[in-house]
């Protein structure tokens, strides 16, 4: 019969900067009633536990570190919820590719131009590519002219990062969205006219009595 093997005890997960795991000798303890006091860490932990709460370090780089008396489970839930909400608000910039041919007709050109405007308005970059097939490569200048026209039509919505370039059998340009600047409304509460809107009529002059 083989002798039993002695396995080392499993290491329990230790919560950092919570209660007894706080290494600082003193902390600025903040309690639910809004009071804050610089006190020894052990005393702050005892006071938090008397309230049925945990002492959690929320600002470890401060001198001394700032710790709050909170319910650790609720604190973790709120923290993860804030991180999730912040991640949802982040916009990942994508490169949207639109493909053309040297002899693309006006209808197809306008259709793809509207797509490009929408992509740029959403904050994405647009890569316009002209593909050459067979002997079309001999007329690469037509593709470059088409890309230059495309960039000019999108001047109000995006800026070209580089001039049209020919790589292999493709010519392309990359367009980045233009950041819009919101102008403050003029003083007095009057609203500035938008693009294409007529200016407001002049205010009537006061009559003399």
Image: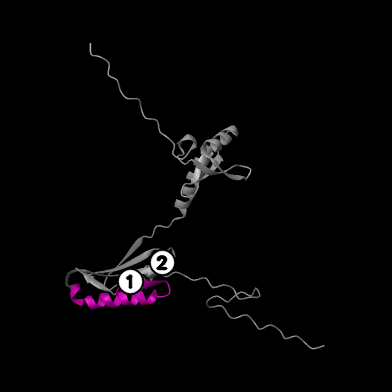
Q: Position of residue 192 (x, y in %)?
A: 59, 76
- What is the spatial separation of the Cα atoms under label 2 and label 1, in whole angstroms? 13 Å
Q: Position of residue 128 (x, y in %)?
A: 31, 68
Q: Which residues are magenta?
A: 136-162
Left or right of 116: which side holds 208?
A: right
The quadrant of the image that shows the C terminus is bottom right
Residues at circles 2 and 1 in contact by the CB criterion of under 8 Å? no
Residue closest to the eye, 140 or 22: 22
At label 2, counting other C-alpha atoms closer than 10 Å, the crowd grade (few under 14, some 14-19, many 20 or more) is many
Visible residue check, residue 77: no
Q: Main secondary structure of the magenta part?
A: helix
- Tell me which residue sits at (32%, 25%) in the image: 8
Left or right of 29: which side holds 80?
A: left
Residue closest to the eye, 188 or 167: 188
Question: Residue farthest to the bottom?
Answer: 208
Left or right of 104: which side holds 53?
A: right
- Residue 161 - label: 1
- Residue 104 - label: none
Q: Is residue 160 above or below residue 30?
A: below
Check if residue 159 falls in the magenta segment: yes
Residue closest to the eye, 121 or 10: 10
Q: Position of residue 50 (x, y in %)?
A: 59, 32
Please identify the quarter of the rendering in which residue 126 is found: bottom left
N-term mark: 2 or 1: 2
Q: Position of residue 145 (x, y in %)?
A: 29, 78
* Residue underneath mark 2: 120
Q: Is residue 117 above or below residue 77?
A: below
Check if residue 190 falls in the magenta segment: no
The quadrant of the image that shows the N terminus is top left
């Amino acid at each position: 019969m083989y002798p039993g093997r002695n396995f080392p005890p499993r290491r329990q997960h230790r919560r950092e900067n919570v209660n007894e795991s706080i290494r600082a000798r003193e902390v600025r303890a903040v309690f639910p009633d809004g009071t804050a006091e610089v006190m020894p860490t052990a005393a702050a932990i005892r006071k938090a536990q008397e309230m049925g709460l945990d002492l959690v370090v929320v600002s470890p780089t401060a001198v001394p570190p700032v710790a709050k008396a909170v319910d650790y489970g609720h604190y973790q839930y709120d923290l993860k919820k804030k991180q999730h909400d912040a991640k949802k608000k982040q916009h990942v910039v994508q490169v949207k590719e639109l493909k053309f041919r040297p002899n693309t007709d006006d209808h197809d050109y306008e259709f793809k131009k509207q797509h490009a405007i929408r992509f740029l308005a959403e904050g994405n970059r647009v890569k316009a590519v002209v593909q050459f097939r067979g002997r079309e490569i001999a007329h690469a200048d037509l593709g470059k002219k088409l890309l230059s026209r495309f960039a000019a039509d999108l001047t109000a919505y995006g800026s070209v990062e580089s001039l049209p370039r020919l790589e292999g059998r493709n010519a392309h340009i990359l367009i980045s969205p233009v950041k819009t600047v919101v102008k403050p409304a003029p003083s007095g509460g009057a609203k500035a006219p938008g693009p294409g809107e007529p200016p407001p009529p002049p205010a009537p002059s006061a009559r003399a009595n």
